[in-house]
Image (cartoon, rainbow, N blue to C red):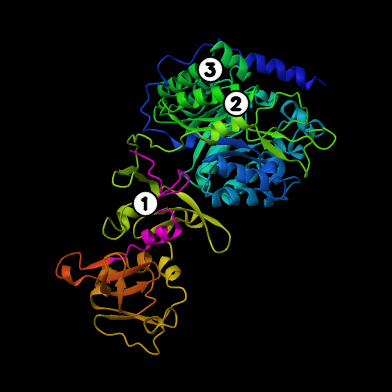
Amino acid sequence: MHSFRAVRALICAMLLFVTLAPIASGTAANHDPEYNNPYLYGIAAHAWWLDPDVYGDQLFPALDELGVTTVRIGIDWKRFEPEPGRFDWSMYDRVFSELADRNILIVANFNTIPYWASTDQDGCAIEWQEILDCELAPEHYRSFERAIEAAVTRYAWIEHWEFWNEPEMWTHFGDLNYLGYLRTFYDIAKEINPEITVAANTLAGPGYIRWLYRVSHDWYGEGEAPWDAVSFHPYAEPNADAAAREGVDPIKSGHIEELHEVMRQYGHAEARIWITEYGWFGSHEASAQVLRETLDWMRGQPYIEFAHLHMLHDWHEDLYSEDRGLMAIVPDEHGRTTLDENTQFTPKSAYYNAFRDLEKGGRIPYHAAGDSRYFSATGHVVSGRFLDYWSRMGDYRTIGLPLTRRYPKQQSDGSWLVVQDFERVRMEYHPNLQGTRHEVLGTLIGRHITAGRENEPAFKPLESCEPAAGRECFAATSHSLAYGFRDFWNQHGGLARFGYSISEEFEELNPDTGRIHTVQYFERSRFEYHPNLAGTPFEVQLGLLIRDDLERTGWIPAESPRDPTWRMFE
């Protein structure tokens, strides 16, 4: 058996060899400080440490204090399917829910092979040997496909997926296997949700990706590469003290720029680069210095979509190991640093505080993309299925301006859906209806905000209702719809757009205008009659129910880049 440490050291030396040079002169200092991508302030993490049942009570508060906006986290096949056909999602459900509840964007990394699916089951079962010995057995390729289907279906609300971690390090990915596996992942994931973004991963950088493009063109045809973005780990000088002392580039900035050029040459000029790992070991003060320098440079590269520092805490039990965390392991009463359920972490003050104190606000310059539309009034972009719904089912008057980016929202049954909020509608993507006209629906905001009003006269079900000219009766809710509101309902989408009426017409003080209006509530909206606009197309309007809900939530005005209402673009 090869020595793992020796083989890994040799591979790292081959892949990470680079002539170290200072970051390009003037690049960092000349960017417009108003533009500052909030998603550069991310952390690379592992689910088993973030699990609320392990260290979550320490680490989630640290993510909050640090102002982390995005977490790159593995979804390991070997963990969620430990035995053939037995899926265990409990840990990932707990961790992802905690992250989503904090409005932290998740970049999911599909990774690893379970021992039972490997040609070498004994070697693959040993964690430190897996990159050497795990090889997908041909008879388990269908198991691999089923695992992809299961993960992407369960977490269809996660819209950014990275396939594998440093494939060049895996012995059996060294030939053409990675591209084939990536193609499989890409095709299955896109069939489940065509609008997710899939990234190819590399440790080596532009040379490896250039080779992948060439082979992909030969195999699949020009422009058919099975990835939408490239994730890169631009480790350079690993010792922060050496980087700070010698003035060398703490990351491979030149390789990042070259990688972007390779992507442009192969027709992916609009594709983005994800820096899903970078970091250093060394003194806390030097680490803080190179962190600030690195992020200052990244802010000037608009093609970098995410950056994730590796990582939040140290993860080796050796006090003298080259750990790179923002937090250190607290030695126990015997002076030992051990990782178990009793482990405590403490911030490395200078390094931790440097990340915490970085300015994470700002905006991103908007560059026009295919099926997207930028709304300058709110600084948000609408694209894909949500833009189709906006155009097909309404406009400014009936749906309004976008008030948020896309974000996951938990439902009453505990599940999560991707939503985007507009002034009058919260659009929900329902993956089970993907490909139909109903894959996007408006949330039942009318039901939500009128909960508890069932005994008010206008909301009590009618004892009887007789349909007549200009009047409809809905048996489903025992309410009616008539005259001008009925005409508006029929002309602007009817049942699919507004749902059934859940009240009769009545007069109510409108908090937006300060006037009393005739209104009627529906499952997904509130109709308002504005007599001062009688005879115009605006005499019937929809209430600003979603905007009001966001104000109650505290997201308007936005206080943090984590808030989905944060103005992202300019």
Which residue appears at 31% of the width and 85% of the height?
Answer: 467
Camera sees residue 267: yes
Q: Amino acid at mark 1?
A: Leu
- Residue bearing mark 2: 279
Camera sees residue 203: no
Secondary element type, mark 1? loop
Secondary element type, mark 2? loop
**Which of 542 and 249 lies nearest the eye of the viewer?**
249
> For the residues carrying marks 3 and 2, which lies nearer the camera in this image?
2
Q: Amino acid at mark 3?
A: Gly
Q: Position of residue 434 (x, y in %)?
A: 47, 53
- Residue bearing mark 1: 403
- Residue bearing mark 3: 207
Relative to residue 380, is residue 105 drawn left or right?
right
Q: Residue furthest bottom?
A: 463
Which residue appears at 63% of the width and 42% of the height?
Answer: 145
